């Protein structure tokens, strides 16, 4: 099947293309669609639905949306649904990922509990009343220093105890097998497989 991903994040699109293969993942720009969605929801699921519905109003193709982020119990769940914007208020501009990671490491100075988890809420919208949702997580802890060049976002500071490396140190295949997005996408892929029959 061919689906359109409601995102402006090229890294997500690249990951999802592999996760959902052989289904084809288009981005709005491929269809000449200028996609923009204000994320006003209070949960990952609300924001994913908002993105999916906003794009569905602009295309007849099946739509997928992903709302994801990083949560730390020691920070009361922050940055959570505000993960993409974390630190931008303090800086007066959107931060690049390495700057955002540095901001997080600074905020954790002196805090012992560095446990963290990623969340990915994924929505497959076939039509207005045919909607499937999946939400998955990945547990880990925040490192002292950034490490690795793979993945995107918080991957260089997200350490996996059992793999003894950060998510940014994993291969693409490993990240997709273990990650919040990989696990959510694998279930959405099963749905696409069955719908394509
Ligand atoms: P779209 O809304 O356009 O899809 P976005 O980057 O704004 O793109 P989100 O609102 O879902 O996406 O914010 C997710 C942020 O959480 C993202 O920018 C990263 O900083 C972080 N994030 C999500 N998944 C991640 C992953 O697999 N690895 C590292 N960081 C991740």
Image: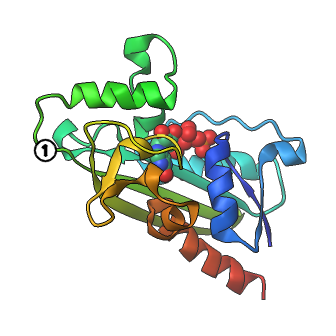
Q: Say which residue appears at 44% left-offset and 61% top-offset.
A: 180
Q: Is residue 189 left or right of residue 59?
A: left
**Where's residue 166, x and y in %?**
37, 51
Residue wearing tag 1: 113
**Where's residue 8, x and y in %?**
67, 39
Residue found farthest to the right: 32
Question: Compared to 181, does 115 lie above or below?
Answer: above
Q: Is residue 157 left or right of residue 110?
A: right
Determine which quarter of the picture holds residue 142. Answer: top left
Question: Compared to 111, does 44 lie above or below?
Answer: below
Specify whether tag 1 is near ligand 1 (CB below 8 Å): no
| Most foreground residue, 163 or 28 | 163
On the question of residue 58 being in view, the answer is: yes
| Most foreground residue, 148 or 34 | 148
Question: Compared to 27, does 1 lie above or below?
Answer: below
**Where's residue 133, x and y in %?**
53, 66
Location of the C terminus by quadrant is bottom right
Q: Is residue 141 left or right of residue 127?
A: left
Q: Is residue 26 left or right of residue 172?
A: right
Q: Report how many numbered discs are placed on residues in the image.
A: 1
On the question of residue 129 being in view, the answer is: no
Q: Is disc 1 placed on a helix, strand or loop?
A: loop
Q: Say which residue appears at 42% left-offset and 37% top-offset.
A: 83
Q: Say which residue appears at 21% left-offset and 37% top-offset.
A: 75
Determine which quarter of the picture holds residue 189. Answer: bottom right
Determine which quarter of the picture holds residue 37. Answer: top right
Location of the N terminus by quadrant is bottom right
**Where's residue 171, x and y in %?**
53, 60
| Most foreground residue, 166 or 116 | 166
């Amino acid at each position: 099947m061919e689906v359109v991903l409601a995102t402006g994040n090229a890294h997500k699109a690249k990951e999802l293309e592999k996760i959902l293969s052989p289904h084809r993942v288009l981005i709005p720009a491929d269809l000449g669609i200028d996609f923009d969605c204000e994320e006003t929801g209070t949960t990952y699921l609300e924001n994913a639905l908002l993105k999916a519905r906003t794009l569905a109003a602009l295309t007849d193709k099946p739509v997928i949306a992903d709302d994801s982020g990083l949560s730390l119990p020691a920070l009361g769940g922050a940055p959570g649904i505000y993960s993409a914007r974390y630190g931008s208020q303090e800086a007066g501009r959107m931060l690049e990922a390495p700057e955002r990671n540095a901001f997080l490491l600074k905020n954790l100075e002196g805090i012992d509990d560095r446990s963290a988890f990623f969340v990915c809420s994924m929505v497959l919208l076939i039509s207005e009343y045919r909607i499937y949702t999946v939400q998955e997580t990945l547990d880990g802890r925040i490192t002292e220093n950034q490490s690795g060049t793979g993945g995107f976002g918080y991957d260089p500071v997200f350490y996996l105890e059992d793999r003894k490396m950060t998510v940014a140190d994993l291969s693409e295949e490993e990240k997709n097998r273990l990650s919040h997005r990989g696990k959510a996408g694998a279930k959405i892929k099963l749905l696409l497989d069955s719908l394509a029959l």
